[in-house]
């Protein structure tokens, strides 16, 4: 009997079902506290800096002034917009890793309109044309992998990932074509003298319009996914393509339509970056947010409203960690280490959100074994 007991595993993992939202955030809150403790340990042992001063500098970097606060909110809006774009595809289990490229293509279309039409169109019409071209370009970049997936069942993860590199090289080529001055390797500020194609400021705030646009898109995507027929079809296709076909849903049509929407929203992001804030085009314009948006969407369980908090949280630590290097004269790598530790704990907490670890109960097992032995005797 002792040999059989030894074969009983110490613990086993079971999947959680219907976890209340408050328990999810309790688990994540514990993960954040543990992350902060780990960061404090690293700070204390590696640099000798008081961890409380480090955390104060993180807050200072994100919200230390009015300008820093607006930049934090602007970065949150851009990251949120990309996460919103990726979410319909992810909910359909179409793994669109091409957000970076779709944003760059939308930005490239915006820059082209501002450069070629900046002198010939009224500003309101130029902005409208620029927005439409950016949306069309992003939608087209999303349509290509969707078509191949629908027709030939290609691997969408690899396809969209490789299209990021194509988009980056296209931007690199046109940066050389449009470079100002020649030989500088950069475009510079587009229409700096005339501000043609630039989005107007609201209440004297450069970033407010971007934030309002993304807020409207957040509400739209929430309603679209939760209450519209298209959102229902996306959910059914994500659960089972066979079930979708059985009840009369065209899986191919849903794939193509959803990726058109996903690419179009990424195109809007590119438009907001070029016309709204940066007013230039570079290969690093998206700054990796196409990949960070994947994490935002996943951590929020594809809920657009929770994505607001998740995006703000990630941007807060990203901007705050950069302040550490500046304030304490540390290498930029140290701020990356702090950010990495925090993200590691946050991502790791998702395991405990989805699964439960149940340990072996020795006493009941022993009692059961003894009962069987007595019965045998």
Image (cartoon, rainbow, N blue to C red):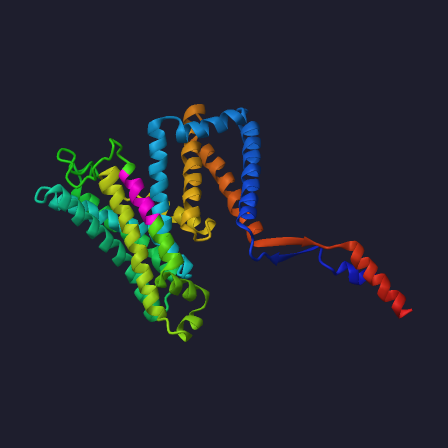
Residue in the picture at 43% in, 53% down: 302
Residue at 67%, 54% (x, y): give it: 358
Decide whether the magenta segment is chiefly helix, strand or loop.
helix
230 in relation to 40, above or below: below
Image quadrant in which the N terminus is located: bottom right
Q: Is residue 212 left or right of residue 120?
A: right
Residue 212 is inside the magenta segment: yes
Residue at 16% in and 36% down: 195
Q: Position of residue 234 (x, y in %)?
A: 39, 63
Between 228 and 25, the residue placed more toward the observer is 228
State whether residue 375 appears in this view: yes
Magenta residues?
209-218
- In the picture, measured across the screen, residue 343 lies left or right of residue 218, that is right
153 and 354: which is toward the camera: 354
Quarter of the rendering containing residue 9:
bottom right
Task: Answer yes or no: is residue 1 visible.
Answer: no
* Residue 194 is a magenta residue: no
Q: Residue at x 41, y 44 (%)?
A: 308
Residue lying farthest to the right in this orientation? 377
**In x, y percent, where is residue 296?**
43, 47
Please state the horizontal and vertical placement of residue 278, each as a whole percent of the image. 25, 38
User: Is residue 215 shown left or right of residue 197?
Assistant: right
Residue 223 sits in quarter? bottom left
The residue furthest left is 120
Residue 279 horizontal/vertical position (percent): 22, 38
Classify 77 as above or below 5: above
């Amino acid at each position: 009997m002792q040999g059989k007991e030894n074969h009983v595993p110490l613990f086993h993992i079971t999947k959680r079902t219907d976890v209340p939202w408050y328990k999810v955030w309790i688990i994540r809150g514990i993960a954040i506290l543990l992350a902060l403790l780990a960061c404090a340990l690293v700070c204390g042992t590696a640099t000798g800096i008081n961890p409380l001063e480090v955390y104060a500098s993180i807050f200072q970097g994100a919200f230390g002034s009015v300008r820093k606060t607006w930049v934090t909110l602007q970065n949150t809006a851009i990251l949120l917009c990309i996460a919103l774009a990726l979410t319909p595809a992810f909910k359909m289990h179409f793994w669109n890793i091409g957000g970076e490229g779709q944003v760059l293509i939308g930005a490239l279309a915006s820059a082209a309109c501002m450069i070629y039409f900046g002198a010939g169109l009224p500003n309101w019409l130029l902005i409208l044309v620029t927005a439409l071209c950016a949306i069309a370009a992003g939608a087209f970049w999303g349509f290509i992998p969707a078509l191949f997936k629908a027709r030939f069942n290609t691997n969408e993860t690899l396809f969209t990932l490789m299209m990021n590199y194509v988009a980056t090289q296209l931007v690199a080529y046109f940066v050389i074509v449009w470079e100002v001055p020649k030989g500088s390797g950069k475009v510079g500020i587009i229409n700096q003298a005339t501000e043609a194609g630039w989005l107007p400021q609201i209440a004297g705030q450069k970033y407010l319009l971007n934030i309002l646009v993304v807020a409207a898109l957040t509400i739209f995507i929430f309603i679209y996914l939760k209450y519209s027929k298209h959102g229902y079809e996306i959910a059914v296709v994500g659960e089972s393509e066979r079930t979708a076909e059985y009840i009369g849903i065209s899986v191919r049509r849903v794939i193509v339509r959803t990726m058109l929407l996903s690419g179009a929203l990424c195109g809007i992001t590119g438009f907001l970056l070029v016309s709204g804030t940066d007013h230039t085009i570079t290969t690093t314009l998206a700054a990796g947010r196409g990949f960070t948006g994947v994490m935002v969407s996943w951590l929020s369980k594809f809920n657009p409203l929770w994505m607001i908090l998740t995006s703000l949280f990630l941007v807060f630590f990203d901007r705050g960690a950069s302040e550490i290097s500046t304030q304490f004269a540390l290498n930029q790598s140290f701020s990356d280490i702090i950010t990495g530790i925090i993200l590691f704990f946050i991502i790791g907490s998702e395991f405990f959100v989805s699964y439960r670890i149940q340990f072996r109960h020795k006493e009941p097992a022993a009692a059961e074994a003894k009962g069987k032995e007595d019965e045998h005797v």
